Image: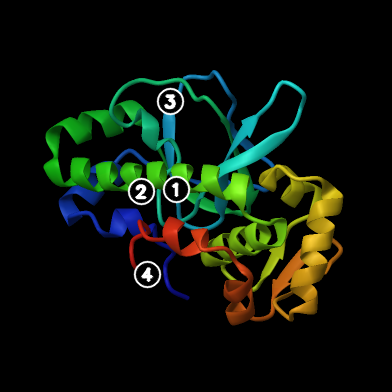
Amino acid sequence: MAEKTNLLLEVLPEDDRAALLKTATRIKLKLGDDIIAPGQMIEVVHFPLSGIISTVNEMADGRSVEAFMVGREGVAGIEATTIPMRSGSRQTVQLDGEAWRIDVARVRALVNERQALRTVLAVYHAGVQRELEQTAACHALHASERRLAKWLLRCHDRADNDLIRLTQEYMAAMLGSQRTTVNEAAQTLQAQGAVSYSRGKVRVLSREALEAAACECYRKVSDHLPPD
C-alpha cells in the first residue's frame, strides 16, 4: 500500500518539507474530535494525510454551518502561519484519518526563513479565501440538492473510498439546512443514481451523476487544490 501523503507538503522543496516535519507528530484524526474551539489561540497546525477536518461557524442560537473543509490537499490552521491568531471558528474531524501536527510557532519561523514555503502557504491561503467567497454566494443562491451534491463531491475527493459515514443531522449542520431539507435533497440524488444512503452511510454510486447534479461552485472551489 502506498504511503499516505499530504499534497501540500509534496509540492514543497525537499529541504523545506524535511524542516517542517523535523518536529512534527503523526496523530490519528477521530470522527467528532475537536481540533480547536472558537476563541482559542491557534497553537498547532495539521497537515492531513487522510480524513477531513471541517472549519465550522457557530451561531448564538446553536445553529452551525461549515465554512470549508481540509483534507490531504491542505493545512488546517493556515491563518496562523504568518502571525499569532485566535480561531474564529471550530475545527472538528469530519472523517477519520491521520495528520502531521506541527507547532505553529515553528511553522512561522520557517516561513520567515524559506521563500518557497512562504509562497506555497500563501497560494493555498489565497485559495481558501476564494473558496470562502464562493461558498457565501453558494449558500445564498443555490438550491439545496445542488449544494448537497457539491459538498458530497468535496468529501469524496478527500475520502479513501466511495463509502462515507455521514448522518443526516451532520450533513444538515454542515450545510446550515434543516434535516428535512437535506433528506429531500438526498432522496433526489438517490433517484438520479448518484448516491445511496442508509444508516448514516453515504455511498457514491456515480461521480458523473453527482457532478451533473452539483452547482458550478464545485469546480470553482476545487481550482486551488494541488494536483493529485
Q: Pointer 3 and pointer 1: residues touching (CB < 8 Å)?
A: no
Q: Earlier in the sequence, mark 1 or mark 4?
A: 1
Q: Amino acid at mark 3?
A: Glu
Q: Nearer the viewer, mark 1 or mark 4?
A: 1
Q: Residue under circle 4?
A: 228
Location of residue 194 (image quadrant): bottom right
Q: Pointer 1 and pointer 2: residues touching (CB < 8 Å)?
A: yes
Q: Residue under circle 1?
A: 131
Residue 84 shown left or right of residue 88 in the figure: left
For label 2, the SS is helix
Question: Mark 2: few, some, or many residues within 10 Å (few <14, many ≥20)?
Answer: some
Q: What is the spatial separation of the Cα atoms under label 1 and label 2, in whole angstroms?
A: 6 Å
Q: Residue under circle 3?
A: 43
Residue 114: percent from the left, percent from the top?
14, 39
Q: What is the spatial separation of the Cα atoms under label 3 and label 4, in whole angstroms?
A: 29 Å
Residue that appears at 43% across and 59% down = 220
Residue 128 shown left or right of residue 155 in the figure: left
Question: Mark 1: few, some, or many residues within 10 Å (few <14, many ≥20)?
Answer: many
Q: Amino acid at mark 4?
A: Asp
For label 4, the SS is loop
Q: Pointer 2 and pointer 4: residues touching (CB < 8 Å)?
A: no
Q: Residue under circle 2?
A: 127
Residue 217: percent from the left, percent from the top?
50, 58
In this view, the residue farthest toward the front is 141
Residue that appears at 83% across and 61% down = 184
Q: What is the spatial separation of the Cα atoms under label 3 and label 2, in whole angstroms?
A: 22 Å
Q: What is the spatial separation of the Cα atoms under label 2 and label 4, in whole angstroms?
A: 16 Å
Q: Earlier in the sequence, mark 2 or mark 4?
A: 2
Q: Earlier in the sequence, mark 3 or mark 2?
A: 3
For label 1, the SS is helix
